[in-house]
Image: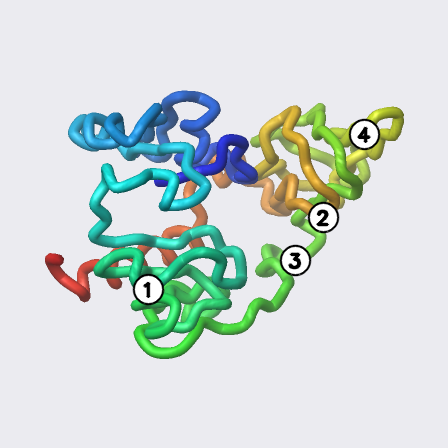
């Protein structure tokens, strides 16, 4: 897996990108380790772990790694630098990609009965711009930075929060903006403390379900999308 030097991950407790800041991290029994160089990727893989390397673009890895399959899992809602020529099989997640032009296969990421389906011709459903509903809560459960600045949390992932309570703040020089919980729930995800963020960046996710396990478990959506990727790889067979 490739990642940014400063990951923007929200659900850090179930993301292998946390290996960048923790050097090693486990998600439901799957171990991920930070690779210092492309050479380390092979050694980590041989140990049965997922190699995570800081490389914003595939080109940053040079020619030391031979890709049979590339998965664009950035959910950027539009093609960035991914090309159908990047590998024998290129899989892209969500809207913005057209199978057969930008990639070989697209996996549907919109909630509904098509979630996780593999599309070999055409595109996924358009971006709705609204997070899926959880117990009637949609856009309000995803918190975004109100200003540019550095995030400072006073609540941690997995902590129960009350609607209107202060859970953090963003500091920009002499300006401070308070971050408040939108409703009663559990802080399911939060960007890494002390991260610099831009206005509008997703910084946290509050789950209205009072479930003390959900923040430690891979979501149903992630499992469905991941299953779609596996299906696409299996359908193409050995390459």
Residue 4 located left or right of residue 128? left
The disc label shown at residue 200, or none: 2
The disc label shown at residue 107, or none: none
Viewer-nearest of discs 4 and 1:
1
184 or 89: which is nearer to us?
Answer: 89
Viewer-nearest of discs 4 and 3:
4
Q: Residue at the far top: name it.
A: 23
Q: Residue at 23%, 37% (x, y): give it.
A: 64
- Read off the residue under disc 3: 138
**Above or below 141: residue 1:** above
29 or 53: which is nearer to us?
Answer: 53
Q: Residues within 10 Å of mark 2 (few under 14, many from 20)?
A: few
The disc label shown at residue 84, or none: 1
- Position of the C terminus by quadrant: bottom left
Viewer-nearest of discs 2 and 1:
1
Place of residue 194 in the rendered image (x, y in percent of width and height, measured from the top left): 66, 24
Callout 2–callout 3 Cβ contact below 8 Å: no
């Amino acid at each position: 897996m490739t990642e940014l030097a400063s990951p923007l991950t929200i659900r850090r407790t179930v993301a292998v990108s946390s290996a960048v800041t923790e050097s090693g991290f486990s998600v439901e029994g799957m171990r991920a380790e930070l690779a210092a160089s492309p050479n380390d990727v092979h050694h980590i893989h041989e140990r049965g772990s997922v190699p995570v390397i800081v490389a914003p673009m595939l080109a940053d890895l040079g020619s030391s790694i031979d890709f049979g399959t590339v998965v664009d899992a950035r959910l950027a809602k539009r093609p960035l630098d991914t090309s159908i020529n990047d590998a024998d099989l290129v899989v892209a997640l969500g809207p913005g990609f057209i199978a057969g032009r930008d990639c070989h296969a697209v996996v549907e990421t919109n909630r509904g009965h098509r979630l996780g389906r593999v599309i070999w011709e055409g595109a996924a459903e358009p971006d709705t711009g609204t997070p899926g509903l959880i117990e009637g809560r949609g856009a309000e459960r995803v918190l975004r930075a109100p200003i540019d600045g550095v995030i400072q949390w006073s609540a941690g992932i997995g902590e129960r929060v009350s609607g209107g309570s202060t859970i953090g703040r963003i500091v920009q020089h002499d300006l401070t903006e308070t971050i408040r919980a939108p409703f009663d729930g559990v802080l399911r995800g939060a960007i890494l403390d002390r991260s610099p963020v831009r206005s509008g960046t997703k910084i946290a996710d509050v789950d209205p379900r009072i479930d003390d396990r959900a923040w430690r478990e891979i979501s149903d959506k992630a499992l469905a999308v991941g299953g779609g990727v596996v299906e696409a790889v299996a359908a193409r067979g050995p390459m």
